[in-house]
Amino acid sequence: MSRTAAVLLVLFLAAPVTRAHAARRKSAESTQTSKKSSKSKSSESRPSDAPVKQAEEPSMDFDLLEPSPAAESPRLVDPELERSIARRRTMLTLHQGMGLATLAGLAATVVVGQLHFDDRYRGGGDTGRYDGWHTGLVIGTTTLFAGTGLLGLLAPTPFKKELRWDTITFHKLFVSLATAGMLTQVVLGLVTASREGQLSQVDLAKAHQVIGYATLGAVGAGALMIVF
């Protein structure tokens, strides 16, 4: 075989390989061009100073306990109940103020009553100078005591309370004793005044005096339960 024929044969056999290599190279160049084009488009669509979006972190805002149905449901307000509570608060505030006034008035009544007793039955001359003061204080203190008691009794009770030994129970106990003492004082005072000039008048006056001090103690103890 001549040299020319050999060269032509080599070129003929190498031509397909060369074409395949050129095709692969052209395909790689086109792929790189498309990637560069897509990158440039994405960079053009996003501003240069735009923050890079990061993956969202899981929220830490969660409840450890499940919400209760009572908390989710709206609170129902009973207008009548609200008025009853407000009326009770007002009446008991007045009850407390009048109770302290009654205690002060009763203390003054006991002091003037002791002076009146000494003036009439213990050699004070029976001048009668404390008679009017004593009578006036008795009427005023009795009126205050009755008004204070009515405020406490007529105050509405919107909530049912079970009986238990607390300060309120002791207050009611002492006030009950004071009520019995006040009624006894009024009766003894009238009876003592009606026994003028009789020997029994002195004994009745002494009983009136003792019950007066006991009533003052009961009222003071009742007030102490409320204030403290």
Image (cartoon, helix red, strand yellow):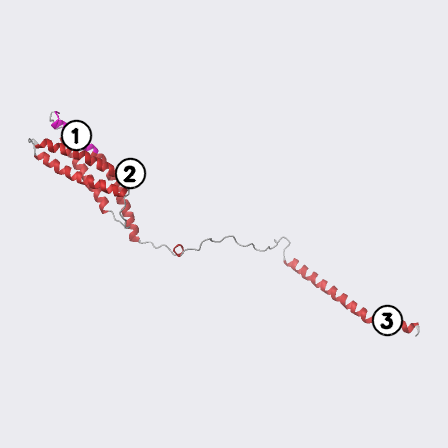
The residues colored magenta run 107-123
Residue 80 coordinates in the image, percent (x, y):
28, 53
Identity, as a three-letter code, of the amino acid under mark 1: Gln
Q: Of residues 33 and 174, which is closer to you in this image?
A: 174
Residue displayed at 25% across by 38% down: 223
Q: Quadrant of residue 137?
A: top left
Q: Evaluate if marks 3 and 1 touch, with contact meaning CB atoms under 8 Å apart.
A: no
Q: Under tag 1, what secondary structure?
A: helix
Residue displayed at 22% across by 37% down: 218
How far apart marks 3 and 1 lie (CA) works out to: 150 Å
Query: Which mark sits nearer the N-terminus, 1 or 2?
Result: 1
Q: Under tag 2, what secondary structure?
A: helix
Whether residue 213 appears in this view of the structure is yes
Identity, as a three-letter code, of the amino acid under mark 2: Val
Residue 174 coordinates in the image, percent (x, y):
22, 40
Q: Which mark is residue 209?
A: none
Residue 39 coordinates in the image, percent (x, y):
67, 60
Residue underneath mark 2: 227
How far apart marks 3 and 2 lie (CA) works out to: 123 Å
Query: Which mark sits nearer the N-terminus, 3 or 2?
Result: 3
Residue underneath mark 3: 11
Binning the other alpha carbons within 10 Å of mark 3 as few (below 14), some (14 to 19) or many (20 upward) gives few
The overriding secondary structure of the stretch rendered in magenta is helix
Q: Is residue 136 above or below residue 25?
A: above
Residue underneath mark 1: 114
| Residue 114 within the magenta-colored segment of the rendering | yes
